[in-house]
Image: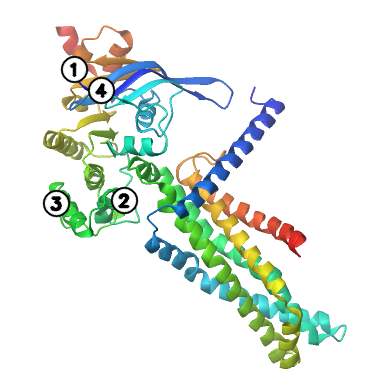
Amino acid sequence: MISAIEFIDVSKTFAKKDGTVQTVLDSVSFFIPAGKTTVIAGGSGSGKSVTLKIVLGLMRANSGRVLVQGNDVTGAKGKELEALRTQFGVLFQGSALFDSLTVFENVALPLRERTKKTEEEIGSQVHASLSQFELDGHEDKYPAQLSGGMKKRVGLARAMQLKPAIMLFDEPTTGLDPVMAQEIYQLFAKTQSEFGFTSVIVSHDIPKIFNLADRVIVLNRGNMDVFSSPEEIQWSEKPHIREFVKMTMGDIYQSHLVEI
Amino acid sequence: MKSNPIANLGNTGLYVLTDIGRMTLFLLKAFRGIFRQPFRLKELVRQVNFIGVGSLSVIFFTAASTGLVLGLQGYYSLNKFGAEGMLGSAVSLTLIMELGPVLTALMVAGRAGSAMCAELGIMRISEQIDALDCMAVDPFRYLITPKFIAALISVPLLTVIFDVVGIAGGYVAGVSLMDVSPGSYIEGMRSSVTNHDIRLGIIKSFVFALLVVWICTGRGYFVREIRGAGFGAESVSRVTTQAVVLSSISVLVFDYLLTAVLL
């Protein structure tokens, strides 16, 4: 399996105000296979967002190495960092749309800033992807005028413009109702099968998110457990994983386990 | 451990040093953005319109009121020595060298500085700045540098407008309302204001513009790093208040320093 992202012995600690040190990642190693969907799960404060930030170079690890598409990007700076980031598309928790720009301008921004395309080419590409994400007729609206689900779709359209090799989704369904969350998941599955990118989803939305997952990584107090399938996680003997399954999936899964 | 005063002092010292370092790097990156392509003319025009044109009415009003008060007050004081003829000179020197640059900077800090700080703060907490970083779009070039250039263009021009309107206000108060002769007002001004005085006023306005835009954009950009700011909407409001207070104080401090050095 080719790896899209690989962490080798990565540690990240934060100094707290009272002088103690909080370890968020403790010598963590894992790899995320190319072209597949990997879900990173874990309770709040377990280091999920920190992991994403280290991948993107928004935060630096204290030790260890990070490989993206086989290239060592630990401590990347300037041009190197720019090159690293162009391989990623990111869908932020709150969509992070630029609220002073219209839907069209938001989606066009990466094309205007990162490519030498003419306004005409940009216009036709943006319109094509807006209709692909069912956003026809909303080009001139501002983010404040959109529903939560539409914002996510605009965010996804914007992140897809430069055809990234890896898509990162940070809590993609936070703040959405179950129906809309389901729609977003279907959209993910559809776009991924179309574009074939590697997808990394950080999510609380368990067990639903497991429907999408090829692999699951569970973060827990600085450590990591990797499962090659969502089913495997339910069979784990480790007490903290059992606890996690019980907490997040509830009794249905528990009774299911007991019966078998 | 939290109540240990020495540890607290050390923590505060570290915070202040980190903050100064952070803000200095911020300033350097903002300037570096000026020399990088592409040059954002459209955004620059938008910012000049916001900082400059948008501040015209408040500058006009402040200048007129300051000029009128200076005219009346100056007349009252000078009249005691029978020196009303000096009114033009007194009003124009006060405005050009002191009040013009200082009050313009304070007004811009209150009107445009606060808005810039809040805008960047909100962009930071809603991850819009992270989004720019992730798209490999330099947030300095895109957001900060145009504001710097626009402030450095707008504030000196606003200062000049302030001076002119203020001097006219002094004329109305002294000549039209009181009994100073028009000739002595104009002549007093002409004979006492030198190029050196005007230069000092302009240098001040450039320095103040830089202080205001630097502090206001910097505080907003680093909203998450500011100690005691809290989180979310509250952090933006606190940091905005802090930015306006800090930039106003530094304008006043630098006013004294520049006057002492350059006069």
Q: CA distance from mark 3 to mark 2?
A: 19 Å
Of circles 4 and 2, which is in front? 2
Q: Which residue is mark 3?
A: A128
Q: Are marks 4 and 3 in contact (CB under 8 Å)?
A: no
Q: Amino acid at mark 1?
A: Ser
Q: CA distance from mark 1 to mark 2?
A: 39 Å
- Residue at x 15%, y 33% (from the top left corner): A196
Q: Secondary structure at mark 2?
A: helix
Please state the horizontal and vertical placement of residue A132, each as a whole percent of the image. 13, 47
N-terminal-most mark, 4 or 1:
4
Q: Which residue is mark 4?
A: A32
Residue B116 vertical position relative to residue A220 in the rendered view, above or below: below
Q: Amino acid at mark 3?
A: Ala
Q: Secondary structure at mark 1?
A: loop
Q: Which residue is mark 2?
A: A113
Q: Classify 10 Å Cα crowding around label 1: few (below 14), some (14-19), many (20 and above).
A: some
Check chain identity for marks 4 and 1: say if they share one.
yes
Q: CA distance from mark 4 to mark 2?
A: 29 Å
Please state the horizontal and vertical placement of residue B100, each as a whole percent of the image. 65, 70
Residue A225 falls left or right of residue B192 = left
Chain where mark 1 sits: A
Q: Amino acid at mark 2?
A: Glu
Q: Secondary structure at mark 4?
A: strand
Q: CA distance from mark 4 to mark 3?
A: 31 Å
Chain where mark 4 sits: A
